[in-house]
Amino acid sequence: MKPLASAACAMVALLCGCTVGPNYQRPAYLPEEHWGEPLAIAPRELPVAGSFTPNSQASERPVEIVQWWLTLHDPALDSLVERALAVNLGIREAEARLRQARAQRSITAADLYPAVNAGGSYTRSRESANAAVPGNTLAGTDENLYQQGFDANWELDVFGGNRRNLEAASADVAAAGEDLRDVLVTLLAEIGRNYVDYRGAQQQISIAQSNVTAQQNSLDLTEKRFEGGLTSELDVQQARSQVAATEAQVPMLETQARLALHALGVLLAQPPSSLSQELAAETPIPTGPPSVPVGMPSDLLLRRPDVRRAERQLAAATARIGVAVRDLYPRFFLVGAAGLESFQAADAFSWGSRYYSAGPSITWPVFAGGRIHGNIALATAREEELFASYQQTVLTALQEVEDALVAYANEQTRRRSLAESVAANERATELAKNLYSQGLADFLTVLDAQRSLYVQQDLLSQSDRAVTEDLIALYKALGGGWETTLPESQTASNRRWSSGA
């Protein structure tokens, strides 16, 4: 009964011209209407003292993050981004993968059309007179054969296997395009993060050096008081130890700055230290806009390139089930040939030398040892894998936004407290130094105040950096930046590696 059922299905399909395999339907996934974490609002300025009060109003307007780095208002960062878009090697790789996918689609699309070949040949032959069939008058003589013509082969895509293959190839092209966009989103975030790391390390170095100067002044004062017999050597050694401890932080911070600088150079397809002179001047850590419109959770399904890529990969896998199912049914072909054939060169193009043949053919695998059903099971399992991968990608995208929201909101709260602490420590250090110079407080009070001030200033600088980095992470989680257009002049001929890049 099973072969008869398959044959009946084949006949129905032949008459109706159906397409075998499941028809793809975009997964229906409806995330929550609102974000679980509070929507963070960035301050326009990050004050030194604690005068910052974050806006508590949530913003769920459609996201406006096409060129999010411009909201940081840093010309140096804008320049780095512009150049990276033109030369970054990761983008080149993704572009090459996209071109490969497009070329593969063109190859696949060719299966829907007839294949026509032209050919010609000349053969000179001689049949043995001693091995010829009796009565063959041509035996033992030389013969010339002139042939030229065309042959054609066209598979009638009755069951839609080739159309399913083209459907899969088209989805592969779209997935490769989304991969390029995902590389772009990651690149922009990496440039922003490393740039902020570099400026943050610069600021920490400046804070450390400023504290070294202040602590050295205290050491000089203590030495003078020791020489005058007003204090003990213990105070001198403690002051000297604090200066050395603060100085020891500078090399570590310089290492952090150089590592970030090297990463930026590589992202711009340049030697690691190529940006040393350009970015040598210290500038403040860039700050974000007054508000961040994150949109609705459902926007991620449209904006995140990795989600869009996973959905297109699922579509391709679904179509390939149909390609595998097609092998259960017969394949129909139209074949033909036409040309000219003669033994004499003078007759090579005469009307009497013509020949032709044409007709249909059919192939139907009767026994394949389970290969066909194995391929169907393989394609089905692959589709199930990518469906689960798509669901996981969506959930991961939602998690990344929620994580970025809570990190951004809490870091702003932490930064406000640190700003208040720095202001209080600055006043405490000033009072301690005045009391010590008047002999009304011991030097340990000054050391504790200076040590606490440096720690809190360093933490505040780290928090300044973390606020902007969390903002960048939020932009990345929202899928921002992929709408940026790559330079039109970026072609394969002018994007070769060169020492002067």
Image (cartoon, rainbow, N blue to C red):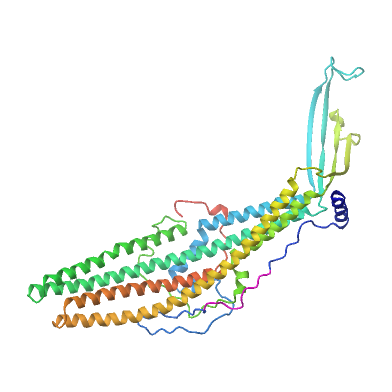
Residue 238 found in image quarter: bottom left
Q: Nearer the viewer, residue 317 or 368?
A: 368
Q: Is residue 351 magenta?
A: no
Residue 118 shows in this picture: yes
Determine the main secondary structure of the stretch shown in magenta. loop
Give the left or right position of residue 249, taking residue 123 as reference.
Answer: left
Q: Position of residue 189 (x, y in %)?
A: 49, 66
Left or right: residue 442 compared with residue 414: left
- Give how far across and how far down residue 268 sits, in percent: 47, 59
Residue 173 at least partly seen: no
Q: Is residue 337 above or below residue 231?
A: above
On the image, the x and y values in percent for residue 146 come to: 82, 31
- The residue lying toward the viewer, choosing from 257 and 168, is 168
Q: Tell me where residue 348 appears, x and y as whole percent.
A: 85, 33
Question: Would you say 179 lies left or right of 212 here?
Answer: right
Seen as rendered, the residue at the extreme top is 130
36 drawn magenta = yes
Relative to 9, residue 409 above or below? below
Q: Which residues are magenta?
A: 28-37
Q: Is residue 336 above or below residue 269?
A: above
Seen at 15% across and 80% down, the residue is 437
Foreground pick, 92 / 388: 388
Quarter of the view holding residue 386: bottom right
